[in-house]
Image (cartoon, rainbow, N blue to C red):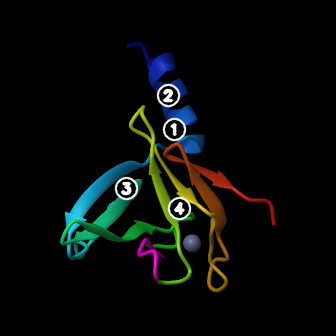
Amino acid sequence: MNIFKIAFSWFLSLFTSTYRMKSVESDLPTKLKSNTLYVVHEDGFLEHAAMLCPCGCTEILQMNLIPDERPLWKLTKHENGTVSLYPSVWRKKGCNSHFWLRNSHIKWCDF
Ligand SMILES: [Zn+2]
């Protein structure tokens, strides 16, 4: 790989950081990694998804996946291994980040 390709892939990764999904049992790790969507299970049931705010503010965002509770997000695992969350995630305080997680990529919403 030459230096131009390395520079180019780094440049590209600024815009298209791919999220990995990581399943955890019961509890989140004390320190979350960036570009990772944590999915918390309890007794085989999905409880919630968690991730660091993609804006870089280090806030932990938690999305409920339990059907009886609101607000409720739907986690979709695609055949190609990517994941999507529905609906979008919108922080109403702090950094006000509003984005979709689609096919393991962050898609920012216009304000
Ligand atoms: Zn943020």
Furthest-right residue in view?
Answer: 111
Label 2: state its secondary structure: helix
What is the quadrant of residue 95 in the picture?
A: bottom right
Q: Residue at x 25, y 58 (%)?
A: 23
Residue 9 - label: 2
Tell me if label 1 and label 2 are in contact, CB under 8 Å: yes
Rate crowding at label 4 as few (under 14), some (14 to 19) or many (20 or more) other CA atoms within 10 Å: some
Kindly report the distance in space between the C-alpha atoms of the residues bearing marks 2 and 4: 19 Å
Disc on the earlier residue, 1 or 3: 1
Tell me if label 1 and label 3 are in contact, CB under 8 Å: no
Report whether the residue tagged 1 is closer than 8 Å to ligand 1. no
Kindly report the distance in space between the C-alpha atoms of the residues bearing marks 1 and 2: 6 Å
Disc on the earlier residue, 2 or 3: 2
Question: Which of label 3 and label 4 is nearer to you?
Answer: 3
Rate crowding at label 2 as few (under 14), some (14 to 19) or many (20 or more) other CA atoms within 10 Å: few
Kindly report the distance in space between the C-alpha atoms of the residues bearing marks 3 and 4: 10 Å
